[in-house]
Amino acid sequence: MKKEQVAHCRFSVWYPLFRTVTIRSVILPLPDNVKEYLLDDGTLVVSGREDPPMHAQEGSDDAEEIQWSDDENTTTLKAPEFPEFTAKVEEAISSLGGSVFPKLNWSAPRDAYWIAMNSSLKCKALSDIFLLFKSSDFITRDLTQPFIHCTDDSPDPSLDYELVLRKWCELIPGAEFRCFVKENKLIGISQRDYTQYYDHISTQCEEICRSIQEFFKKHIQYKFLDEDFVFDVYRDSRGKIWLIDFNPFGEVTDSLLFTWDELTSGRNLKGEQSEEEATEQDYPVFRCTNSKVTVQPSPYLSYRLPKDFVDLSTGEDVHKLIDFLKLKRNQQDDD
């Protein structure tokens, strides 16, 4: 995998070429000060949040128990503000219907969905986006090591980072598929959410494979900038295929139900399908989770924190926060 191939998979490079077959999106340049804020390892304070202050009722136990420190040495953390950038983001979100799916040049913060109040990547404000981005290893990799798995020694291409806002669509995980292309030939299709079993995929695999192959030949083949690449698609309830994203053909991209050795060498790729059959029909190898026995935990679970910690950090459960403050006060009294 070469650096040029990674650069070609940037959203702003491929989106103009395939605008008519993908989800409507807005691309905004990412200012340097916003990039620095996203990479700041300090305490997570989300810029742009407008959470209403919470007031305890007079005479209540909460009002008696919680006492905020008046120590003049106490430092209040304040997030930086980006008024001009915020205005552009708000305008873009409004133009896309009020809810968006955010990403950077390559990656979306899929590993950080758990920290959002709605446990989703659905964002309605810049603060929602910042919370996800600052909690995501995928976003950090985009910003710091975009060419980490590249094998060539050429200089890194110059990059302008961008915030990509995609119109929010309720996509069913069981309708997403990842497609692997080598030498401009579609060689493999994998169920995207391979940790789950979907009955409709097993029963409609031939039809799904055929529709994706037709979409590839009509809209993708020979139109992308490289001959080796990976693309993701969504098949809606009417059977229509939508392009979701492009990824480099290499280890930086999850091979899902394939291995990269199979995809690069062709060994064991055919499986139960005979070589002659695959060649004559010019069909890719299609793989899906075909048994409930093989269902696995989500690969993103390893990025999660304990729920109690998340509730405390987001303020989602006020009672847990009150109990935590009481506990800290009792500990101080014991000391």
Image (spheres, rainbow, N blue to C red):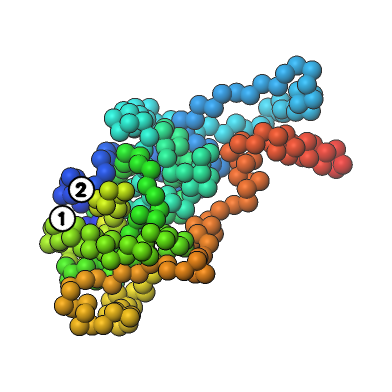
Taking the view exactly as shown, the residue that stands out farthest to the right is 334
Which residue is painted at 24% across and 71% down in the image?
Answer: 284
Total residue callouts = 2
Distance of label 1 from label 2 (alpha carbons): 8 Å
Residue 69 image offset from top left, x and y in percent: 72, 28
What is the secondary structure assignment of the residue under circle 1? helix
User: Are the residues at dot 1 and dot 2 in contact (C-beta closer than 8 Å)?
Assistant: yes
Residue at 13 percent of width and 57 percent of height = 218
Is 119 above or below relative to 107?
above
> On the rendered structure, is 288 left or right of 244?
right
At x 12% / y 62%, what residue is drawn? Answer: 222
Which amino acid is tagged 2?
Answer: Val
Residue farthest toward the front in the current orientation of the protein: 203
Occupied quadrant, residue 141: bottom left
Q: Nearer the viewer, residue 149 or 324?
A: 324
Does residue 253 appear to the left or right of 328 in the view shown? left
Which residue in the structure is indicated by mark 1? 219
Vertical placement of 332 versus 190: above or below?
above
Three-letter amino acid code at disc 1? Answer: His
Closer to the camera in the image, 288 or 166:
288
Which type of secondary structure does the marked residue at label 2 adopt?
helix
**Which quadrant does the C terminus fall into?**
top right
In-front residue for pair 318/131:
318
Query: Which numbered disc, 1 or 2, marks the residue that appears first in the sequence?
Result: 2
Q: Nearer the viewer, residue 81 or 283?
A: 283
The x, y position of residue 53, in whole percent, is 60, 23
**How packed is label 1: few (under 14 Cα within 10 Å), some, or many (20 or more)?**
some
Q: Which mark is residue 265?
A: none
Residue 21 tag number = 2
Q: Position of residue 283 (x, y in %)?
A: 21, 71
Residue 230 can be seen in this image = no
